[in-house]
């Protein structure tokens, strides 16, 4: 995978779920969930990029429980993943959503020898072990996403359109919940990796609200009102700066906030030409942000001005990158709903568009050297 | 000559020097006849006899003379003897006289010395008397107020007193005098410091003090500080008057009190100290003038003095006085400052002008906004509003330019100066640019605030058009107007060509921002309707479609309303023939949703800059609305009837919207995308027959 050459992997069905394998620190692996209303046709694809050769290896698992709307690998165990799924029951002519935890039989993707290769090629999609399924209390309730607790492997946060609940992994019992108002539904959310890992931030229409899950969650512990002029679509916490978070929304902007002062974003760019569906901080180099939008582009943006550190003398270390778009990745033909950095390698990322195209790309080398040197 | 030579050398000439008797005789004997020889002989004999007698008389005569001379010499010898004796006697007498005279002078010397000593003593006594009288004299003079006499007397006596000051008798005088003088100095200083003394009295005091050997620098300081305190009083009274009187009166007061006194002070200073480098005065004058300028600025800024006429007249007076002062002070900073004051005035005036234009324009905009908000877009003629706004703005600017020309009147002291003309030209141009830039900024701000502030989209259209009009013609018109005015007021002034580019950029970006905002606003309004309607509906268990949903009509109305508003202001480009609009979009295979199709179609930029014509504006709004429909459809799950309902909706939208915008391919691509996405999200994807869809659409 040389400069500017992205690797493309195509799937059969529509896709809007992508996750890096957080628990894996050596191999560059991404998991994709498909979205198809046909019964028993959905799959989880595990894609591994062999760094030396640039070869792509895949393994396919069945996901018969329904179409995948959201997918998160466990940060605690590389083989465990969490899907938010939806299935149509023709008997009741009703859709039911749910959250399930699966365990992959093996995390290995690259075949060890030719025999195994042929075995993989001949074999169909493998099965995964279901550890737990959580269904909403009301059957028609829509689940937006489910997120692993950053440190406690026994907890997951589930965002439904009407509320947020934290569940125990072993029993599936709800530990605490916060409800949205009837008019302004939740559209997504994430754990705050700082502040003792107890805060869960949710997207509610144009606003960001963060609840402390240890409380009764009647009142948010902090919030950013009108974070976007239209619907807010995604958020991501800065992995290193505890008060910074990035948000993306239907006004096509990427905003970075210091939530202690949620009046004005500290950084704002409008580089996409349609709704921005996803935003991700690079875990190692927080000044790099990845956004995916329904204008069928993934953009690599530098927000160096809000990520400059001060050295021991209190002087600002000169920022190496100019703020703004570093690179636009245009290999997609349809809306890009997911974009994720690799968990194992700081310079590789994947973007996934609705037309089932996964594009694996790298940060251009000259930017990489600029940051490193 | 030859003849004479011959004669001279002729040896035959008896009177010549070369006479040769033998030759003569030979010649005579040879040449002459006997008779002739005989005659000759006789002649020679007579001549010889004559000569002989003549010689004898001569001898006799000379002999007599010699005899008498000898006698005379003998007589003289006896006379000299007598003389000698006389002379001896004389010298003896002379010696006697000399000895007598020395005797006399010796005897007289003593008395002469006495006399001269007496004279000296008398003079000294005179002086002493003067000295002894000095204190009383001084006192008297001081009491009479004749300070100058007192100082004069004292300065005369002072040297003596200094010399003999150690003698006890003088010491008392000296101490007395110095006490008096000390008192005098004190009085003088007091007078210096007292506020009632006039500047000329002040000068006198200082010159007296100076004669009393006060050191120069301290005197200068005192003088200046006294003058300053006096001038400060003027300043204070002037500053207290700032609020109460108008500029003309103020300038009058300032000229007659403060500036006049300052002039006196400075000229006195020059007279008295004849300061070669005169370091203090410029600083001093600058310090005072700085405050004066400061006050003047305040006066100018007072709202009462806004009237151009009164301002110009006041400024004229002030400037005249300043010029006069400049000659006295002869400092460059002063004259520069005076020029600055005028320029500042002009700038201030211009600032007021364009600020008032801005606020007035803002007011009129608010009115327009209210009228737009109260009426529907159908009833208002946007073109009329645009025209009135444009004319209003142009007139305001032109009026203020004309107003500024008052600074160039011929009769003003600064009116015809090139720097003034330049300043006026500059500020006029500034009025134009500031107005335009402000217009742009205002429009940009409105465009930015649009979504949160609910500004009518018609206003955005009008403002965008206004900016474009200004860019196209307004700025140039104003520029030529300005040049004309300048030519009239200051003929012959060369004004450099102004750079209009940056204003143009401002205006065009503002217009673009307004258009973009309008497009996004309309698009988002429609998108919001579609989004809410798509997300709220249960598509899975929807009933069979009876007609297009109401929201589709509302979307069409919204878009059509914006389109008609845009058509009032922006030229309609030629619409392509609408043959193809008949073609229904599902004439292609239902499985049209494939990456392959997308490869061949262009990427659609949804939030992209809008062009300044009706079709482009409508295209922009359509894109925003329909792309939102696509994205929302993908988030839902459809049943068979839900899909068919959407099919009807899409068909309806396609029919109604194809008359807007000019990019049918775009419209169809987006609608096709929406339907294809719905098909993918459908659990039982069965489309209706196109003919049935047509019927349902018409029935609805």
Image (cartoon, grey):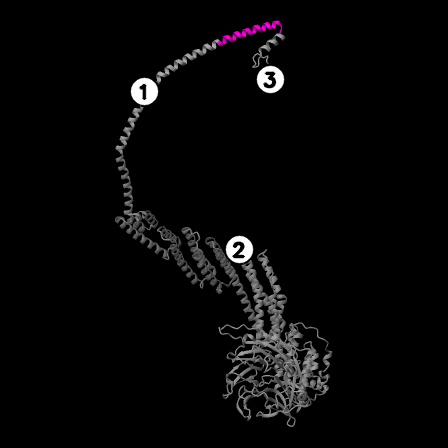
Secondary structure found at label 2? loop
Q: Which badge, 3 or 2, is on the more N-terminal residue?
A: 3
Left or right relative to B229: residue B627: right
**Chain letter of disc 1 in the image:** B
Tell me if residue B240 is in the magenta stretch.
no
Q: Nearer the viewer, mark 2 or mark 1?
A: 1
Q: Residue at x 29, y 53 (%)?
A: B179
Q: Residue furthest bottom?
A: A91
Category of crowding for the residue at label 2, using alpha-carbon neighbours closer than 10 angstroms: few (below 14), some (14–19), many (at least 20)? few
Considering only vertical position in the picture, is B118 above or below B457? above
Tell me if residue B46 is in the magenta stretch.
yes
The secondary structure that dominates the magenta segment is: helix
Q: Position of residue A246 (x, y in %)?
A: 56, 80
**Chain letter of disc 2 in the image:** B
Can you identify the residue that label 2 sits on?
A: B411
Can you identify the residue that label 3 sits on?
A: B5
């Amino acid at each position: 995978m040389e400069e500017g050459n992205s690797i493309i992997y195509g799937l059969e069905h529509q896709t809007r779920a992508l996750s890096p394998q957080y628990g894996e620190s050596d191999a560059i692996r991404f998991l994709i969930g498909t979205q198809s209303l046909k019964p028993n046709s959905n799959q989880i694809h595990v894609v591994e990029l062999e760094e030396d050769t640039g070869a792509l290896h895949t393994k396919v698992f069945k996901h018969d429980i329904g179409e995948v709307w959201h997918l998160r690998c466990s940060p605690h165990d590389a083989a465990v993943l969490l899907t938010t799924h939806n299935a149509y029951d023709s008997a009741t002519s009703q859709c039911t959503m749910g959250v399930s935890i699966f365990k992959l039989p093996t995390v290995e993707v690259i075949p060890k020898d030719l025999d195994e290769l042929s075995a993989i090629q001949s074999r169909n999609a493998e099965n995964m072990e279901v550890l737990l399924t959580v269904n909403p209390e009301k059957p028609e309730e829509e689940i937006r996403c489910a997120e692993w607790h950053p440190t406690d492997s026994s907890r997951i946060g589930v965002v439904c359109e009407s509320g947020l609940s934290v569940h125990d992994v072993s029993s599936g019992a709800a530990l605490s919940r916060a409800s949205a108002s009837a008019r302004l539904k939740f559209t997504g959310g994430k754990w705050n990796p700082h502040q003792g890992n107890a805060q869960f931030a949710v997207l509610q229409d144009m606003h960001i609200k963060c609840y402390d899950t240890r409380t009764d969650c009647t009142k948010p512990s902090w919030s950013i009102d009108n974070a976007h002029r239209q619907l807010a679509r995604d958020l991501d916490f800065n992995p290193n700066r505890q008060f910074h978070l990035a948000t993306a929304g239907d006004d096509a902007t990427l905003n970075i906030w210091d939530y202690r002062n949620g009046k004005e974003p500290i950084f704002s760019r409008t580089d996409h030409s349609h709704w921005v569906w996803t935003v991700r901080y690079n875990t190692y180099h927080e000044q790099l942000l990845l956004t995916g939008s329904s204008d069928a582009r993934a953009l690599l943006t530098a927000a160096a001005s809000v990520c400059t550190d001060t050295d021991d003398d209190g002087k600002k270390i000169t920022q190496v990158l100019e703020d703004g778009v570093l690179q636009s990745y245009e290999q997609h033909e349809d809306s890009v709903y997911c974009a994720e950095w690799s968990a194992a390698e700081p310079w590789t990322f994947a973007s996934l568009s609705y037309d089932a195209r996964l594009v694996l790309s790298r940060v251009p080398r000259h930017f990489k050297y600029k940051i490193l040197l | 000559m030859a003849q004479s030579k011959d004669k001279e050398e002729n040896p035959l000439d008896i009177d010549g020097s070369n006479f040769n008797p033998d030759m003569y005789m030979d010649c005579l004997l040879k040449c002459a006849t006997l008779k002739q020889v005989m005659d000759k002989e006789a002649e020679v004999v007579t001549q010889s006899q004559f000569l002989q007698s003549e010689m004898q008389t001569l001898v006799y005569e000379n002999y007599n003379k010699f005899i008498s001379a000898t006698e005379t010499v003998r007589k003289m010898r006896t006379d000299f003897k007598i003389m000698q004796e006389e002379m001896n006697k004389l010298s003896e007498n002379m010696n006697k006289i000399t000895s007598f005279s020395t005797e006399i002078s010796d005897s007289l010397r003593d008395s002469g010395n006495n006399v001269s000593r007496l004279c000296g003593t008398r003079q000294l006594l005179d002086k002493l008397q003067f000295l002894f009288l000095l204190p009383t004299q001084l006192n008297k003079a001081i009491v009479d107020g004749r300070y100058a006499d007192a100082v004069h007397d004292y300065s005369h006596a002072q040297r003596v007193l200094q010399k003999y000051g150690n003698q006890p008798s003088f010491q008392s005088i000296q101490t007395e005098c110095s006490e008096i003088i000390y008192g005098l100095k004190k009085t003088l200083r007091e007078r210096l410091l007292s506020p009632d003394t006039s500047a000329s009295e002040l000068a006198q005091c200082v010159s007296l003090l100076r004669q009393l050997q006060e050191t120069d620098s301290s005197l200068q300081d005192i003088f200046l500080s006294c003058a300053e305190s006096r001038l400060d009083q003027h300043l204070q009274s002037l500053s207290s008057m700032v609020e109460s009187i108008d500029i003309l009166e103020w300038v009058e007061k300032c000229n007659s009190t403060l500036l006049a006194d300052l002039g006196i002070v400075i000229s006195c200073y020059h007279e008295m100290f004849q300061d070669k480098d005169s370091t203090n005065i410029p600083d001093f004058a600058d310090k005072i003038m700085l405050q004066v300028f400061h006050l003047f600025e305040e006066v100018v800024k007072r709202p009462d003095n806004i009237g151009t006429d009164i301002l110009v007249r006041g400024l004229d007076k002030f400037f005249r006085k300043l010029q006069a002062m400049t000659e006295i002070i002869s400092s460059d900073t002063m004259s520069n400052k005076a020029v600055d004051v005028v320029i500042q005035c002009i700038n201030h005036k211009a600032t007021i002008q364009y600020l008032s234009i801005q606020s007035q324009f803002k007011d009129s905009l608010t009115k327009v906004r209210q009228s737009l908000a109260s009426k529907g877009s159908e009833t208002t003629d946007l073109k009329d509003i645009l025209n009135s706004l444009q004319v209003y703005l142009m007139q305001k600017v032109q009026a203020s330019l004309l107003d500024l020309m008052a600074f160039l009147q011929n009769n003003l002291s600064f009116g015809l100066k090139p720097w003034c003309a330049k300043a006026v030209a500059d500020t006029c141009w500034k009025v134009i640019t500031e107005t335009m830039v402000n217009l742009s900024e205002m429009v940009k701000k409105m465009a930015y605030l649009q979504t949160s502030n609910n500004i009518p989209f018609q206003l955005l259209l009008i403002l965008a058009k206004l900016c474009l009009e200004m860019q196209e013609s307004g700025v140039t018109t104003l520029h030529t107007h300005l040049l004309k005015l300048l030519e009239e007021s200051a003929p012959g002034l060369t004004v450099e060509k102004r750079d209009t580019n940056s204003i143009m950029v401002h205006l065009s970006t503002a217009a673009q921002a307004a258009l973009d905002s309008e497009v996004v606003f309309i698009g988002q309004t429609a998108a919001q309707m579609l989004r809410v309607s798509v997300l709220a509906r249960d598509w899975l268990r929807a009933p069979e479609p009876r007609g297009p949903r109401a929201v589709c009509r509302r979307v069409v109305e919204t878009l059509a309303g914006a389109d008609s508003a845009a058509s009032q202001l922006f030229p309609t480009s030629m619409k392509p023939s609408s043959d193809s609009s008949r073609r229904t979009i599902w004439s292609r295979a239902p499985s049209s949703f494939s990456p392959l199709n997308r490869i061949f179609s262009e990427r659609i930029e949804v939030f992209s800059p809008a062009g300044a014509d009706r079709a482009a504006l409508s295209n922009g709004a359509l894109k925003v609305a329909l792309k939102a429909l696509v994205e929302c459809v993908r988030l839902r799950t459809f049943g068979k009837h839900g899909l068919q309902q959407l099919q009807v909706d899409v068909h309806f939208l396609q029919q109604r919207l194809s008359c807007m915008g000019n990019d049918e391919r775009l419209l169809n691509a987006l609608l096709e995308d929406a339907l294809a996405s719905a098909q993918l999200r459908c659990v039982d994807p069965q489309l209706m027959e196109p003919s049935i869809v047509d019927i349902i659409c018409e029935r609805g």
